[in-house]
Amino acid sequence: MNKKLILTALLASTFSFSASAQNDEPKVAYLFTYFTGNAPHEEQICYALSDDGYNFTPLNHGNPVIKSDSIALTGCVRDPHILRGEDGKTFYMVVTDMRSSLGWSSNRGMVLLKSTDLINWQHSTVHFPTKYPKTWGNVIRVWAPETIYDHQAQRYMVFYSLRTSDHDSFDRIYYSYVNDDFTDLIGEPTFLFDNGSATIDGDIVFNPADQLYHLFYKSEGGRGIFQATARQLTAERGQRPGSQWTKIDGHVDQTQKAVEGVGVCQSIDGKSWIVMYDCYGDGHYQFCTSDDLKTFKWVQDTQTKGKFTPRHGTIIPITQAEKDRLLLHYGNYANPILPDFHADPEVLYSNQTKKYYIYSTTDGFRGWGGWKFNVFSSDNLTDWKDEGTMLDVKGDQVRWANGNAWAPCIEEVKQKDGTYKYYFYYSAHNPKLNRKTIGVAVSDNPVGPFIDKGEPIVTDSPAGHGQQIDVDVFFDPKSKKHYLYWGNGYMAGAELNTDMMSIKAETIKVMTPKGGSLQTWAYREAPYVFYRKGTYYFLWSVDDTGSANYHVCYGTSKSPLGPIEMVDGQYPTILKQVPEKFIYGTAHNSVLQLPGKDEWYIVYHRINRHYIERNMQPGIHREVCIDRMTFDKKGRIIPVTPTLDGPAPLSAKKNK
């Protein structure tokens, strides 16, 4: 055997042994390390967990797990890369030491971190102008460092992109070895690779199947994610640095969007690879899969949900013990309680199934253009299961509408024979009338199938202005009658006929709250009515749905059709934003009373923080939350402080 074949065989043996050593304990989940945006409070290290490597839930309420100002010279970090060490129990992380608000050519170094438990990290900084004043004193970029173990050198290698202030310079990938303590770089940076133009965000993995190192990188020339392969990480003695790499034709990314921050991880089962990259201009991650690192198949674009808005990060497989440790230390936040984007929630407790249900506007569409209603079920108000689409206003279920499925409500009615009917009210765009109108569908099960009446039941504004949207249904325990409420720009109410499928036209009443400290802005939309201890409570939303100030006020009445009275001379605000916790636009609610108890919850939507902070269509990026609601001794609603945690899950005993 020649020297190259001997070296290849030795490397294969070493990698086989290393992989075995690292997999003594089965891996059951994936840990994602990432940052969330370009503001200083977003340039922090965050964690998220996944069981499948594609769908992630943030830890620590989406907040940083390591404070950047405690580890970085700039007080901010980006591009975290995490690696499990060769001993299987030590973890290494490297991050860009950078505050982007100072400019994209403002960073001068990196941070090295080391941990044995994924929670406590030692750290040290490498400032290139200080460490290399003669050769890299004019460096303006030290971008996206990553770590890999070089079996030939028997040392950890950190590779990164460098650029100086020279006019003819562009970003190239260099490498350095790290000392035994993982606290400093050894020797001068050595050239590793470039694509002939700016080459950044390198990620290297070794594929045992073809015995090749695969280098993935972003190229500014040609735009996108590309790949090169090599038999060994560094050039042999006498070879030109970088000549060991062979560039592979074709894009790795499966999109026309601008991308960066590629990360590649072998799946837990060892049969495929997870390939992910940051579609940074569109605010989401894209995930692909590959069996051979030659062909790549799109899997999904990961929707931002809750506080999960990842930017340029990496993932590693973890064991059950590691997962349990992370969950114990960082917990898992409850709010928002539904995945992805939803708004205008209606909550129902079903006496038939003894479960809770939420119906909502499916959000995230331009112009509030969603057309489907999905229903979610839970037995503890914390864990919600998507039961699927129960009404599609573009399909055959609803003949009179073609989109804009908004703000539903539902009522469970027990029949004389002991069975139940569910009456689902909603608004949608009526193309014949060219405006929003309100319809109703019925089912004998809270998750459907639902049958629409075939025509809307509210088509015109009794106030002469505003939209026929934001419907609410209410059962009056005193009169045993049902009432319907609706209106944007006005509040209207009317008694329902006993068929629950039509309203008594003669009872329609405009009852818009006016006056008080808010004057004409006392009411905007989203009426909601409930009854407690002899008092009718009317809740509604104020301001615009895309405003951080969107909030909930209330008044009271002695009857289900008003008049609505002030409380202590005003319509009090009972739910509003908490900017210091990055909670915005808390409104459009429903209310839940636990069966047989004087225990109350308010279910509402808020605006996803990143979309409002970046002013990226905040009005259509909303998420559903839940919190406790309480009353004082006089029956006044105590203002609710919206939380990140939400309430504790209901026990099985409390649910019965």
Image (tube, rainbow, N blue to C red):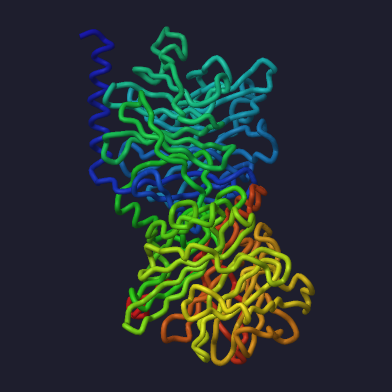
| Position of residue 48 in the picture relative to residue 527 (left or right) | left
Q: Position of residue 190 (x, y in %)?
A: 50, 19
Seen from the viewer's position, the closer of residues 584 and 61 is 584
Relative to 378, say whether 529 is above or below: below
Residue 636 visible: yes
Q: Specify whether residue 188 is in view.
A: no
Nearest the eye: 628 or 441:
441
Quadrant housing the N terminus: top left
Instruction: Give the percent coordinates (x, y) of residue 641.
Output: 59, 72
Residue that sits furthest to the left in the current view: 1
Residue 468 percent across, percent down from the top left: 63, 65
Seen at 53% across and 74% down, the residue is 502
- In which quadrant of the rendered view does residue 520 lie? bottom right
Query: In the figure, is residue 607 to the left or right of 186?
Result: right
Please tell me which residue is depicted at 42% across the width and 86% down the height of the picture: 596
Quadrant location of the C terminus in the rendered image: bottom left
In the depicted structure, whether residue 345 falls above or below residue 241: below
Q: Quadrant of residue 588?
A: bottom right
**Residue 4 % position (x, y):** 28, 11
Measuring 57% from the left and 17% from the top, which residue is drawn there? 197
Q: Nearer the viewer, residue 358 or 428?
A: 428
Vertical position of residue 14 compared to residue 418: above or below: above
Question: Looking at the image, how many numbered discs can be counted on the residues?
Answer: 0
Q: Is residue 523 left or right of residue 416?
A: right
